[in-house]
Image (cartoon, helix red, strand yellow):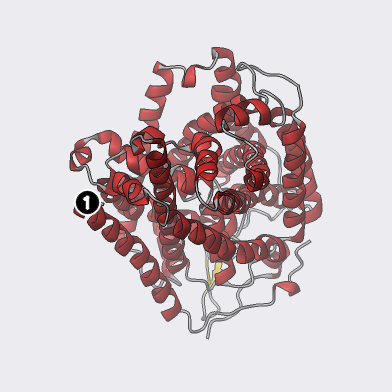
Amino acid sequence: MSGAAIAMMLVAMLVIWGGLVAAIINLNRGSAGEVTHDAGKHRDL
Amino acid sequence: MATQTTSPTEKSRGAFSSRKVFIFAAIGSAVGLGNIWRFPYVAYENGGGAFMIPYLVALLTAGIPFLFLDYALGHRFRGSAPLSFARLRRGAEGLGWWQVGICFLIAVYYAAVIAWALRYTFFSIDKAWGSDPNGYFFGDFLQAGDPGVTVDVVPGVLIPLILVWLVLIVVLVLGVQKGIGATAAIFIPILILAFGALVVRSLFLPGAAEGLNALFTPNWGALNEPGVWVAAFGQIFFSLSIGFGIMITYASYVDRDTDMVGSGLVVGFANSGFELLAGIGVFAALGFMAQASGVAVGDVAESGIGLAFVAFPAIISEAPAGALIGVLFFGSLVIAGLTSLISVIEVVVSAVRDKFELTRVTATLVVSIPATVISLVLFATTSGVYVLDIVDHFINQFGILLVAVVSMFVVAWVLRATPLLADHLNLTASVPIGLWWRALVMVITPLALAVVLVDAFRTDVQDAYEGYPGWMLGVFGWGGAAAVIVFGFLAAMIPWARSNALEDPGYPLPSGRHVQKGEQA
């Protein structure tokens, strides 16, 4: 692989997968009070 | 501590049990066949590594902002696409039914592609296509003749297609959490593992580096070409499941305290993350194929049906442990396709439930039985592949894209609802939505999508798509795209079964006060 191709692949991985990790961390940091409720109690019929 | 704010009426519609399940379901919807078979070729054709720049610009300025808009509509107005639009403004209901019509049409052909992939998962084990994957796919498997419409049934497609619809009906009958949510929570991790294993295997094939070189070598000159930017916005738009009711519907099943902005960022980046993974896996495999055939990577690079059912079988035949590659590849297509198809047909089921106050089982059967019949009649025949190709092309360009542009224009400029929706998102947002978002969804995103739409319209008016007969393009292409518009506005005339269905559900704040439409939080 050429140097330019390797560089672009790494940049794309860093930005996209790094963005995903940052988004997950951001979401978890703001979710201390997230409620998980029992879906079984929903009348889903 | 967050409070439980879902009303009994909303609970009766069904709900995801947690934000995590919603995110899995939204990723399952966004990650579909297009991520695997469209993105790699679009990137390769439009500047290689340099394409990543317009692609990321499109993701951040159009894809994710549009995703927030869909989320805001469904989460704020707590309904299917028609109900959410109608609660925003009674006259806007037709936009929601237009989206429902599009989803119905997509579901009937999308199921057929999943049925093909299901068969090919098993064909991979003994490489049933022999030395001629192209002849096998179009001849032996699909038994395709000349373009036209026939009623000659192909049993090899009919049976797996019935199976796909049965699975779909069972999932939908089980409901939002136990069906849709559970399926996504189980299958998305399996998809990531299976596709990850495929990528690792592909990277160790001889010639893989050449494939990656072809995909990522930047052609900086491409950035000066408007077509490359159009392709990037188009790719982001089509791959995120935005603008045609899916994300509105799913957001309506999410608890009111959920951070929709933070969730949207995860879904948007996860979708692109999977596309990047697919690009690496597909081009590593194509690099192997090129080396084995003694040709350039560009000579074997394909997209869509050609990549999946012709190029990949050839790779599977040549590669060491090819059967494993085949099972992982086609198995991934089945899972990615199925979780997307569930979300597409749920848009229709949810709308029918809301409008006619039906139980989930009844609504599922009312929608699925006709959809199954149409799907079998049109796509389990020897002409199925041609009809599918035409419907897919036209409903994407002049269905999804057109309704997205029109609904964005109506919401942002006619109803001037973006301040209300921004306020709503900000009630729970981990990343505050500001003027930047309103500028993007009012100007940048609709403008960019309108350019993509005009470009597509010009191309299809100038040249008959793929050289198909004019009557086929008229009936299944332009006719299908026009029919869903007519359907949308006719369906909006039918009265709602519940007299107070269109009342603004409001939005309870932690203080107990409700925010109503037009009121600032």
- Above-or-below relation of B156 to B83: above
Position of residue B483 measured from the top left corner of the image (x, y, whole percent) = 61, 27
- Quadrant for the C terminus of chain B in the image: bottom left
Q: Tell me where residue B42 sits by quadrant.
A: top left
Nearest to the observer: residue B356 or residue B197: B197
Residue that extends furthest to the top in the rendered view of this protein: B470
Judge the density around disc 1: few (<14), some (14-19), many (≥20) Cα neighbours within 10 Å: few
Residue kind at label 1, given as amino acid type? Ser
Nearest to the observer: residue B448 or residue B156: B156
- Above-or-below relation of B140 to B164: above
Q: Which residue appears at 66% of the width and 23% of the height?
A: B383
Residue B375 seen anywhere in this rendered image of the structure = yes
Position of residue B494 measured from the top left corner of the image (x, y, whole percent) = 70, 39
Nearest to the observer: residue B280 or residue B485: B280
Q: How many marks?
A: 1
Residue that extends furthest to the bottom in the rendered view of this protein: B1
Residue B483 seen anywhere in this rendered image of the structure = no
- Above-or-below relation of B143 to B260: above
Residue beneath disc 1: A2
